[in-house]
């Protein structure tokens, strides 16, 4: 499948933004994301970016838009269905992750939605948890949009770096990809530091 998509994108580069939009939409859509090898396909797409085959701005824009819409649809759907229906439609293998994620979500709220996109098991259920917990629309969407702007380029970066070489990536002829990855790592480090502080350091 990956080889087929790679060959098709190489021959039809103009369709790449739409294809990447669909990939990240399906990757972010609860349930469906378990059936689509979107991560591997995005790494491959990043390699095509590094090779100069595809336009980076259209591809990155499509990836961001698909990620935002996928999570938004999951959020709206779970609010409409309600908690019982959500539990019934989840695969049994994901129900434990769902329960753990709900506890995490109730404690961390906005941060759980934002950082959940970067954690494989959480990415599939974070929008559902937000909808079940009746999170405010503006709070969810702000975390959804902010995380998508970092997650989508970060997913493309490994393939891009492999094709360009680390030295050329450091030179940063496409700074959006490198900058997003650095911001993502910085945000994760900050979140981990704050969590460690709350557990270890005494409250004032």
Image: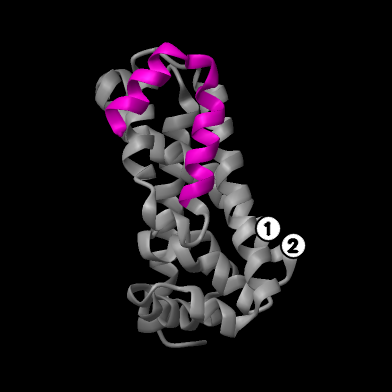
Report the front residue among 46 and 184: 46
Q: Measuring from the top left, give residue 54's x and y in whole percent.
A: 45, 16
Give the prevailing secondary structure in the magenta stretch: helix
Of helix, strand and loop, which one carries label 1? helix
The N terminus appears in which quarter of the rendering? top left
Decide if residue 75 is in sight here.
yes
* Residue 60 is a magenta residue: no
- Residue 111, by quadrant, is bottom right
| The magenta segment | 1-27
Q: Residue at x 45, y 31 (%)?
A: 177
Report the front residue among 174 and 153: 153
Tell me the tag on residue 93. Answer: none
Question: Real-space Cα distance between discs 2 and 1?
Answer: 5 Å
Tell me the tag on residue 138. Answer: 2
Q: Determine whether, in the image, residue 179 is placed left or right of residue 137.
A: left
Report the front residue among 38 and 54: 38
Q: Determine whether, in the image, residue 147 is placed left or right of residue 194.
A: right
* Residue 25 is a magenta residue: yes
Q: Residue at x 44, y 70 (%)?
A: 194
Tell me the tag on residue 141. Answer: 1
Decide if residue 118 is in sight here.
no
């Amino acid at each position: 499948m990956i080889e087929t998509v790679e060959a098709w994108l190489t021959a039809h580069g103009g369709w790449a933004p739409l294809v990447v939009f669909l990939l990240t939409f399906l990757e972010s859509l609860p349930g469906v994301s378990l059936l689509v090898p979107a991560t591997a396909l995005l790494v491959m797409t990043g390699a095509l970016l590094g090779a100069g085959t595809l336009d980076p701005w259209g591809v990155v824009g499509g990836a961001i838009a698909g990620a935002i819409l996928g999570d938004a649809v999951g959020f709206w759907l779970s609010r409409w269905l309600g908690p019982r229906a959500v539990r019934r439609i989840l695969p049994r293998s994901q129900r434990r992750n769902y329960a753990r994620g709900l506890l995490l979500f109730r404690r961390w709220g906005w941060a759980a939605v934002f950082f959940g996109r970067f954690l494989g098991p959480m990415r599939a259920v974070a929008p559902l948890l937000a909808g079940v917990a009746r999170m405010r629309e503006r709070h969810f969407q702000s975390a959804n949009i902010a995380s998508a702007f970092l997650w989508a380029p970060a997913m493309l970066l490994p393939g891009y770096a492999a094709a360009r070489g680390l030295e050329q990536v450091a030179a940063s002829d496409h700074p959006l990809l490198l900058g997003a990855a650095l911001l993502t790592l910085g945000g994760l480090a900050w979140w981990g530091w704050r969590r460690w502080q709350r557990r270890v350091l005494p409250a004032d």
